[in-house]
Image (spheres, grey):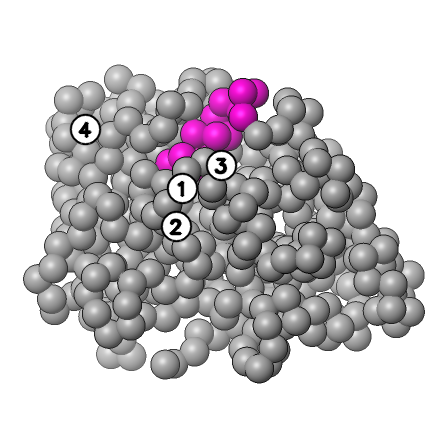
């Protein structure tokens, strides 16, 4: 199987253009409150030449409406369904941060836990700046660590926790770019090491922790890691990448990020199960943790726009703060927008990493938000 470049497509959703929602109706085709979600999605899917498009409208009670249109694989007639599994890419980060928040609530970890504390033997080789890196720095992208590493070279013969420990050893040899806590630098490495802290402290893999601490309590049963579906089969959506010929041609592929990057971006889920996680954040006070932990998850550092797994921005249509993220493994793309003060969110995903995928999902999110507000 071909391998993805370690330089991942990182497009944070809070840079998208959903500010246009309260402009005058842009065209007669703008969706009304009665337009079926499937009709909205199909028009956008055709316009942007996507293989498939799926979305859900979520409240604190879960997914209220959803639809999936298009095909699982270009060149194959199998249609996507509402129960299909979609790759969530960096939208995994909010899940990892939430799981770690549960461990903080249980007293197993603290936001100021450092890599040096958890790995005393490795700490002997850390410089002063590296010794200061905390869980909070890792989860808010303020550790000074690089965006990516040579993920596929961490060793197939090692377990995933061992691969992530090898990543730590390699990072110790690389000086952090800035004093921890001082600058934002989007880092998949940081999230992988946050996952390593959790799995080392708890004596179980990040994947097992996610199932035990998050997926099972939320009854998320259509969720997993890596490529959804059976290799070679069309039992789940395939990813798609532009061909070297360009001109909008797409090649269906079954690819994913390296498993070692898991805490930063390997979860896949159905729209309904992704919606269960989103609903948890819309109304968390009766759920897994006290309000204090939820507030910490949603609060960026001073003068910043990134909290713990969420971009945090002000949007008029949200009545204040909106929380958002996007995700990609270069052959799939997804985005979510949450309006906590209005108790709703939209989640949108496609099985394509083409250049226009982000624009298509931005348009779909905008139309669904507009429809919900009507």
Q: Nearer the viewer, residue 53 or 365?
A: 53
Q: Indicate the position of residue 259 as horizontal and vertical percent values.
A: 51, 67
Q: CA distance from mark 3 to mark 4?
A: 36 Å
Checking the image for residue 31, the label placed there is 4
Q: Which residue is mark 2?
A: 223
Percent position (x, y) of residue 261? 55, 64
Does label 2 or label 3 sit earlier along the sequence?
Answer: 3
> On the rendered structure, is 82 left or right of 175?
left
C-alpha span from label 2 to label 3: 13 Å
Q: Quadrant of residue 161?
A: bottom right
Q: Secondary structure at mark 2?
A: strand
Q: Main secondary structure of the magenta part?
A: helix
Residue at the disc numbered 3: 217
Q: Residue at x 60, y 59 (%)?
A: 205
Q: Residues within 10 Å of mark 4 (few under 14, many from 20)?
A: many
Q: Are marks 1 and 3 in contact (CB under 8 Å)?
A: no
Q: Quadrant of the C terminus?
A: top left
Q: Name the mark nearer the viewer: 2 or 3.
A: 3
In terms of secondary structure, where does tag 1 sit?
A: loop
Q: Mark 1 sits on what residue? A: 220
Q: Quick check: 188 above or below 7?
A: above
What crowding class fits label 2: few (fewer than 14 Cα within 10 Å), some (14-19), or many (20 or more)?
many
Residue stretch in magenta: 275-287
Does 370 sit above or below residue 309? above
Residues marked 2 and 3 touching at CB (< 8 Å): no
Numbered disc in front, either 3 or 4:
3
**Mark 2–mark 1 distance (CA, rounded to whole Å):** 6 Å
Label 3 sits on a secondary structure element that is: loop
């Amino acid at each position: 199987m071909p391998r993805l470049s370690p330089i991942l497509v990182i497009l944070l959703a809070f840079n998208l253009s959903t500010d246009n929602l309260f402009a005058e109706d842009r065209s007669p085709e703008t969706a009304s409150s009665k337009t079926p979600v499937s009709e909205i999605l199909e028009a956008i899917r055709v316009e942007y030449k996507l293989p498939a498009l799926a979305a859900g409208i979520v409240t604190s009670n879960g997914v209220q409406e959803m639809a999936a249109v298009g095909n699982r694989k270009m060149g194959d007639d199998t249609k996507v369904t509402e129960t299909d599994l979609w790759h969530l890419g960096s939208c995994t980060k909010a899940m990892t941060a939430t799981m770690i928040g549960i461990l903080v609530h249980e007293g197993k970890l603290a936001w100021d836990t450092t890599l040096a504390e958890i790995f005393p033997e490795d700490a002997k080789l850390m410089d002063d700046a590296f010794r200061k890196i905390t869980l909070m720095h890792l989860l808010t992208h303020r550790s000074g660590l690089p965006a990516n590493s040579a993920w596929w070279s961490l060793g197939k013969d090692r377990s995933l926790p061992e691969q992530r420990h090898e990543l730590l050893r390699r990072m110790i040899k690389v000086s952090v770019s800035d004093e921890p806590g001082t600058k934002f630098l989007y880092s998949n490495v940081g999230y992988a090491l946050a996952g390593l802290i959790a799995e080392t402290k708890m004596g179980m893999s990040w994947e097992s922790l996610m199932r035990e601490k998050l997926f099972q309590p939320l009854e998320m049963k259509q969720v997993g890691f890596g490529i959804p579906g059976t290799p070679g089969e069309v039992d789940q959506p395939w990813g798609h990448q532009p061909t070297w010929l360009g001109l909008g041609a797409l090649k269906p592929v079954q690819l994913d990020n390296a498993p070692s990057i898991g805490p930063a971006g390997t979860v896949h889920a159905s729209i309904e199960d992704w919606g269960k996680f989103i609903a948890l954040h819309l109304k968390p006070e009766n759920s897994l943790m006290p309000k204090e932990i939820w507030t910490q998850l949603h609060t960026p550092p001073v003068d910043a726009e990134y909290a713990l797994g969420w971009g945090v921005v002000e949007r008029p249509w949200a009545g204040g703060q909106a929380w958002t993220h996007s995700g990609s493994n270069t052959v799939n793309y997804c985005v979510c927008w949450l309006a906590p003060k209005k108790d709703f969110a939209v989640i949108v995903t496609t099985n394509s990493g083409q250049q226009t995928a982000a624009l298509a999902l931005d348009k779909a999110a905008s139309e669904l938000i507009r429809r919900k507000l009507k």
